[in-house]
Image (cartoon, rainbow, N blue to C red):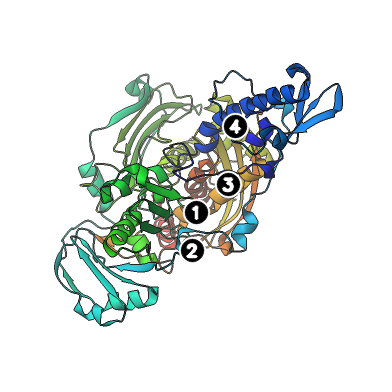
Amino acid sequence: MLADELDVELWNVEMVMGDTELCPWDMGTFGSMTTRVFGPALRSAAAEARMVLIELASEKLHVPVERLETENGVAFDGNNTSTRISYAQLAEGKKIARHANGNVKVKDPSQFKIIATPVTRLDGVEKVTGRAKYAGDVRLPEMLYAKILRPPFHGAKLLSVDVSPAKKYSGVLVVQEKDLIAVLHTQPDVAEAALGEIRAEFDKPTSPVDSENIFDHLLKTAPEGKSVAGDGDLRKGETEAKEILELTYLDGYKAHAAMETHAALVDVKPEKVSVWASTQNPFTAKEEVAKELGVSPDRVRLLPVFVGGGFGGKTHNTQIVEAARLSKLSGKPVQVSWNRREEFFYDAFRPAAVVKLRSGVSASGKITSWDCHVYFAGERGAAQFYAIPNHSTVVHGSGWGGEEESHPFITGPWRAPGNSTNTFARESQIDQMAASVGADPLEFRLDNLSDKRMIRVLQSAAEKFGWKPAPSPSGRGFGIACGTDAGTYVAAIAEISLDRSTGNVSVKRVVCAQDMGLSVNPEGAAIQMEGCLTMGLGYALREDLHFHGGEIFDHNFDVYEIPRFSWLPKIETVIIDDKSADPHGGGEPAIILMGAVIANAIHDFAGIRMLRLPMIPERVKQALDQKKG
């Protein structure tokens, strides 16, 4: 966007991001906000910067402003193209700064040269060749690696500890301060070995809550609901219905499971505290470090490094604060890099949630009533978008923030927070209503929609897929789901096969259509969609956190299964580009569909309705056996 408005080549723009000393304050990277929130500001600033350069060129070339044009970093006389000067010559190596006032118009879509043109990532080669630097790759002279004593359970309290065996290792520094006990060494394996020698005793808090009864617990501890949508009269709507469907949908906790674990390197010096960290919110981290160390925030600088996956999980900066404390105590740069067990233990899990739905459908296939109660999945994607005259959606709890009594450990945002759960429930319920009146699931949706954007994405997905109408279950294994997230409309159609002897589901093909307004980089948008659909296979089919009280039983990917390449279906994407519209979010929307589209495909294949995510083979097999019985 900036390159296009400034009229320079794409590779002539260097983006500095995450450096708290060079960048203006921002809240962080989440919510698919980058393009839709910062994009307009970048375009406006670039348009004004271009005008500043034109004014400078007018002075240098003695050509009126209205005759000057720009292209590829050069200003020239439109009447005499040989009269020209480059931006570099105009700047003369000096910093040119202005406060943007928004008075310069940005380009009309017909003038785009780079925007809406597919471009691969400029940092792709750096990442796939291993040259990219992440927080765990940064090295400083005299730096120490820290290994920290961790409790075995959430809520556990340290009763006694003997650190003397760890001190037998040469060069080991043992730090004890309040709740922090750590072993530091110039070699990480030595620090790890010394940590293993520490003898610690913890109490084990008792709690009856586990991964099976958590849903009953959530309903018992849920706060009062807040209405997020409603109209008409539910009782009237139910009297007009031929069928009333009342179903409860369950979704368990999910880990973020990013490739890179939380890591940070902090160097505390009297004049400056330097931080390299995997974080989605550098400025928040800066404030947290300053508060922990008791210094002014202007003494703390976070420097930019790549982040190896966040998905909402790297908005908690515990490892940064740990490294800062240890650097201050040791007087050396200290790196804290969580291992996979720590990553799972301290993850701010996507909250388990319950959605209760009661809906009515008429004999003619019109939805007459919709009564929805969402527990701990939050508002995102909760309010339905169908043309239902009598409806109510009430949300009980966000899933994180002040809800500790409901969850046995920390919870937080996970890619399109809560929307995957809400979409799973809504689109499963819609599919079940279509089946109850013998309607084709695509035609049923279209008959109950008035939103033109949603109708368009559904029809685009169906056309690409080659949809042929048939009531579900048809035995084909086709599923449909649609939804909205971050201002973007998405629809997907999937084809699955099902091994009835094991309950294992194989997704063979997924077609996804997306309307995100202006697609700034169609290649980047398609890659995000493919990534969302791939990641979505995990929460839909396998990712399930096992726990009892504060004890987490999933420590690595041998038991917590994330998608593998062997699972991947054929993925086809359709981007409905509207260059005249504002750009909307593209990093999360497609993921919200995968639970619903696969559940609906399972119903179409075998006539069973899966009401709980993930749809692991054991649960699918149980549903098949119950249907036979």
Label 1 vs label 4: CA separation?
27 Å
- Which residue in the structure is indicated by mark 1? 305
Amino acid type for the residue under numbered disc 4: Ile
Label 1 vs label 3: CA separation?
21 Å
- Which residue in the structure is indicated by mark 4? 96
The residue under the point 55% across, 36% down is 35
Q: Which mark is residue 409?
A: none
Left or right: 601 with respect to 350? Answer: right
- Which residue in the structure is indicated by mark 3? 528
Find residue 429 and report its image quarter. top left
Q: Is residue 449 visible?
A: yes
- Which residue in the structure is indicated by mark 2? 137
Q: Nearer the viewer, mark 1 or mark 4?
A: 4
Q: Nearer the viewer, residue 623 or 484?
A: 484
Label whose residue precedes the other's in the sequence (4 or 3): 4
Label 1 vs label 2: CA separation?
9 Å
Find residue 339 and report its image quarter. bottom left
Q: How far across and down, in percent of the image, does residue 559 sit?
A: 40, 67
Image marks 4 and 3: residues in contact by CB distance under 8 Å: no
